[in-house]
Image (spheres, rainbow, N blue to C red):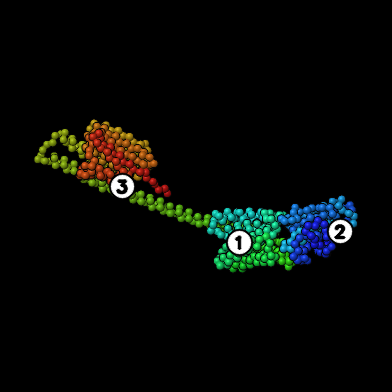
Amino acid sequence: MSAARADSLSDTPPASGWETVHLPDIWSTRWPGHDGTVWYRVEWTHCPGTPVAAFLEYLSMAGVASINGDPLWADDSLVEPLSRSWNMPRYSLLPPSALRAGANTLWFRTVGYDLYSSGLGGVHIGPPEEIRPLYEQEWLLRRIVPQVNLIISVTLGCFFLVVWLLRRNEQAYGWYALTSLAWLLFGLNSVVTTPWPFATTHGWSTWITLIFTVYCSAFSMFAWRFGGQRFPRLEKALWIITGAVCASLLALGPVQPKIVFYLVAVSYAAVFVGTCVQFQLHALRTRRPEHLFLAACMLSFLVAATHDILAFLRIIDDVHGYTSGTAPLMMIGMALVLAWSFTTTLGRVERFNRELAEHVDKARQELAHTLGRQYELEVANARLNERLQISHDLHDGLGSSLVRSIVMAEKDGATLPPRQYLSVLKSLRDDLRQVLDQSFAAAPSAAVSPADWIAPLRHRFGELFDEQGVRCAWRIAQAWPSEPDTARRLALTRFLEEALTNVIKHSRASAIAVTLADAGDGALALSVEDDGAGFDIDLADRSMTGIGLRSMRARIARLGGRLEIESDAGGTRLRAHLPAITHFSG
């Protein structure tokens, strides 16, 4: 096996300058600083009649292969932008027509740069059944594994990016997403076969170096945030340096001095290794399961990364990188740790929600009990007030009538006419009915429906209207718009009672209409209209005789409603509007 430098434009091997080499070969170890073309020739002896296959592990950066002068394959571009064949194994079944009995020569023309370890990988020649498995194994390592690595990175990166966008306070998810996406871009270096969209290999190399600095910085931030660590000054310095390095790389342009390329790569590899080592120590201190698991994942990747760094610096002789194979395992391990942490957090939230629901349910029961007790107290208070009212009514109404009647009957032993006795007895009867009806209206269970509620008043006042020849129309809704409580039913009873009594006493009406209707949105409207003589509303409000009107207004206002009064020579109209009432549901 031998190699020789040549003119970049030459399509034929040089006649001199050949040196013996061993594959895999990196020509910068022999010709430092050489950028351009190197020819390689591999010679072997062939026995006619036996099939022969050739397998090339890699070629950096681009090249052409031929057998005894007949072409085998060629990369798309041997000038900038150069094809990238360092990650592309080649397998060829050598055509029998190109083979010779005895000595045969495989020619490889390689084009590359000293900066990127250009040269020729291992070459294997032999029977196809022996060579093909070697090629498939190399294809798995150089093509399939990196592609799987990228698929895993983009999937996990996008998933945790969405998680972080939904839970912005979980910074570890955001840094993991950035780490995964940066690794995706960096991993393209192992997959793409052209430097597009960059015009040169150096432009692509600058981009990859820049992405590597971002990856290492984001990885450090993820490890610190996941471990619950904060280093404000260190973090600020890290990103300031990273920004300065990226700006410098862009300022240098496509062509970087070799020392800059190595210095940046080694420095940020040291940042990565230092973060892994520091997290190992942190996990040993915390002893938390998720920290220990992530530390184990980092340790496995740390071993692979150390191997690749040593190979990159040519301290060890190995052309295969381990990080491409272990990176998917580490990314999956990191994702599992994050998922574990996420589910643990969700478990705590669910437990808190259950406890909160139990407390809310207990509070609801206590509130329902309190409201029930309050309702009972309100009913008892209403009954007590009604008893007091009955006492007042008996004293002021029936009592006064009895006293007046007794005085009239005993005055000077006078004898009253039978008609006057009958009038006195009817008055006493009416006062007693009023007291009984008021007592019935105060009972909480008295009103099942509007018709049941108004029945006692309708019966009592209906008889009075019949005796006086007054026509009365009762227009009552079939159901309540919203079920009124005891206080509202009692207030409506008092209002209607006062209004009808005023009609009998003062209006001299021949017709009256009572309407109970739905006013919309659960509100209630109760109106009393007559065709009597009417009265002066302003005068009645100012006089002592207007106490009844003011009492009716106050009674409706206490329930949040309003009372409208209209009166003229054609009659009087009273309209009470009560808003809907809402009930607590335990």
If you read the primary sequence from the N terminus, does the residue marked by circle 1 or circle 2 appear first? 2
Residue kind at label 3, given as amino acid type? Arg
Quadrant in the picture for residue 47 = bottom right
For label 1, the residue is 218
Q: Which mark is residue 558?
A: 3
Badge 3: few (under 14), some or many (20 or more) residues near its Cα, within 10 Å?
few
The location of residue 308, given as percent across then percent down, is 70, 64
Cα–Cα span, label 3 and label 2: 114 Å
Cα–Cα span, label 1 and label 2: 51 Å
**Element class at badge 3:** helix
Badge 2: few (under 14), some or many (20 or more) residues near its Cα, within 10 Å?
few
**Element class at badge 2:** strand
Residue kind at label 1, given as amino acid type? Ala
The location of residue 180, given as percent across then percent down, is 63, 57
User: Which residue is painted at 56% across and 56% down in the image?
Assistant: 164
User: Which residue is painted at 61% across and 55% down in the image?
Assistant: 157
Single out the mark in the foreground, 3 or 2: 2
Whether residue 390 sits left or right of residue 365 in the image: it is: left
User: Which residue is painted at 10% across and 39% down in the image?
Assistant: 413
For label 2, the residue is 44
